[in-house]
Image (spheres, rainbow, N blue to C red):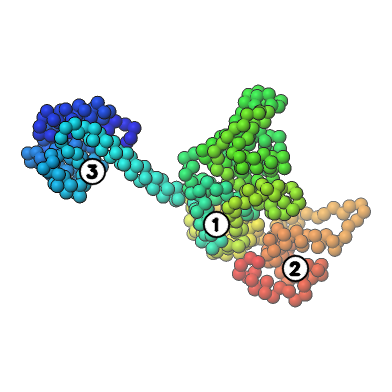
């Protein structure tokens, strides 16, 4: 039953004149009606065509109104039944309500108005029930679709729970974390779990465009606003009306545009480039950054008032090195997307993957596995297919720095290379040693030499690095 299409009503009464007049009155009120003169005929009509409601007299030759009610409830449970009854049968009518009738009306005087109100209320209630059911199924399916985020680590689960809680509100969300930790995926999940999920999803990378183009991209421009503006162009804020706008790399936003963004967040209005008219938008903002905004505020490269406005509901996404236990699940997820299974990765390769810190996080893991699968072909992925698990022989054999005319300091060069290796390995000294073609013990010795490590330090690190990344 819907509130927009005409309600199809079957009128049943063994008093033919009453059946005909009631059907005509309901038709005048906007319903689509048919009438029949008894319970048996009503069942045949219900088998032949779909009806949203049955309006039936209570006392008829068998099957009477109660028997018809029972049959309709059993065979067409979505069909509403309203009983017409004389005063003497009111108690029976009330019992019928307990058996599933929607309502009853007394057959005295002009009862059509009461009947019309009852049917319209039934239509509205049924439409609401169906909409609630649809939304429940939609939310459940969205949960499965919206959160393909793999990981059981406590930090991952905390981030997921926060995303679920904030999604049902209209609050601004700030996703924080290193590159490759899945900020885009979390942002999409917040959108899909929100009441705006049927609205547009629009993404803007604030670090990908120069300031002049970024302003036009975000806020649009009027015809003639600048050279090449041959027509009016709505911005991404307007494109996202009724939905979600994802501002990725919001920390890269120039100061001049930070002022304009703050105005939109506080007043929900902006002007196009070259325009004067204020445009009002209804947009949910999700922002993301991999930069330390607090430091940028202190350095006056990011507005403090904008930071506080963006930081209403921050969610920090953990780097992969802080959740190494999730690596096997992520590996399985990526393999499944490529039509493979865990059997495609050798135990040695899996141990190497689980022990590698992945400075590029999940994105680097995906690229590493994709490359390894191509190299391995039909064979299982082994250590020889993982670039990080072996020294770079090509570089070792061919790369030699050119000595400048003024000379160089070998000591300074060695220290700089060790620092660079440690940074690339995210502090994992075993990996840093492999990057430099050294043993771990030799790396420790040279770190001491350059005051990068205190003498005697490392026993605990060595034990830790045999298991998980430092």
Please report whichever mark, 3 or 2, sits nearer to the chain's N-terminal start: 3
Q: Position of residue 108 (x, y in %)?
A: 15, 35
Determine whether, in the image, residue 157 is placed left or right of residue 109: right
Q: Position of residue 34 (x, y in %)?
A: 19, 30
Cα distance between the residues tagged 3 and 2: 82 Å
Measured along the vertical axis of the image, is residue 272 above or below residue 266?
above
Q: Secondary structure at mark 1?
A: helix
Q: Position of residue 309 (x, y in %)?
A: 63, 48
Q: Quadrant of the C terminus?
A: bottom right
Residue 443: mark in rendering = 2
Measured along the vertical axis of the image, is residue 298 above or below residue 43?
below
Residue 102: mark in rendering = 3
Look at the numbered discs 1 and 3 and tell me whether their residues touch, using CB distance below 8 Å: no
Along the line of sight, the residue nearer the viewer: 35 or 358: 35
- Depth check, mark 1 against mark 3: the one in front is 3
Cα distance between the residues tagged 1 and 3: 46 Å
Residue 107: mark in rendering = none
Cα distance between the residues tagged 2 and 1: 37 Å
Residue 159: mark in rendering = 1
Density class for disc 1 (Cα within 10 Å; few <14, some 14-19, many ≥20) is some
């Amino acid at each position: 039953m819907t509130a927009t299409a005409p309600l199809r009503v079957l009128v049943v009464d063994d008093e033919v004149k009453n059946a005909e007049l009631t059907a005509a009155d309901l038709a005048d009120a906007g319903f689509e009606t048919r009438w029949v003169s008894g319970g048996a005929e009503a069942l045949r009509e219900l088998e032949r065509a779909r009806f949203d409601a049955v309006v039936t007299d209570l006392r008829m030759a068998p099957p009477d109104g109660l028997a018809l009610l029972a049959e309709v409830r059993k065979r067409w449970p979505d069909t509403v039944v309203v009983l017409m009854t004389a005063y003497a049968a009111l108690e029976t009518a009330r019992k019928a309500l307990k058996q599933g009738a929607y309502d009853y009306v007394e057959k005295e005087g002009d009862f059509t108005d009461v009947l019309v109100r009852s049917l319209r209320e039934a239509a509205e209630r049924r439409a609401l029930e169906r909409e609630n059911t649809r939304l429940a199924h939609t939310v459940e399916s969205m949960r499965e679709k919206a959160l393909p985020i793999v990981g059981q680590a406590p930090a991952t689960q905390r981030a997921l729970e926060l995303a679920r809680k904030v999604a049902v509100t209209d609050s601004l969300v700030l996703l924080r974390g290193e590159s490759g930790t899945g900020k885009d995926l979390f942002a999409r999940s917040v959108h899909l779990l929100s009441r705006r999920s049927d609205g547009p999803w629009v993404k803007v990378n604030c670090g990908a465009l120069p300031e002049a183009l970024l302003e036009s991209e975000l806020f649009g421009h009027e015809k003639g606003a600048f050279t090449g503006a041959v027509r009016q162009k709505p911005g991404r804020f307007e494109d996202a009306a009724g939905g979600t706008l994802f501002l990725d790399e919001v920390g890269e936003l120039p100061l001049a545009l930070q002022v304009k963004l703050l105005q939109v967040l506080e007043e929900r209005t902006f002007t196009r480039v070259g325009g004067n008219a204020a445009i009002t938008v209804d947009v949910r903002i999700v922002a993301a950054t991999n930069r330390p905004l607090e430091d940028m505020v202190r350095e006056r490269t990011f507005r403090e008032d904008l930071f506080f406005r963006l930081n209403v509901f921050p969610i920090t996404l953990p780097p992969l090195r802080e959740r190494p236990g999730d690596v096997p699940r992520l590996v399985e997820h990526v393999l499944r997307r490529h039509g493979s299974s865990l059997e495609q990765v050798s135990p040695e390769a899996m141990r190497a993957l689980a022990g590698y810190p992945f400075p590029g996080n999940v994105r680097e893991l995906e690229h590493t596995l994709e490359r390894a699968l191509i190299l391995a072909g039909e064979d299982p992925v082994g250590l020889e297919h993982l670039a990080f698990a072996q020294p770079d022989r090509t570089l070792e054999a061919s790369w030699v720095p050119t000595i400048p005319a003024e000379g160089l300091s070998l000591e300074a060069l060695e220290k700089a290379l060790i620092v660079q290796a440690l940074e690339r390995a995210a502090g994992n000294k075993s990996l840093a040693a492999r990057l430099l073609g050294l043993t771990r013990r030799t790396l420790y010795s040279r770190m001491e030499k350059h005051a990068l490590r205190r003498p005697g330090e490392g026993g605990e690190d060595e034990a830790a690095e045999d298991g998980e990344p430092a």
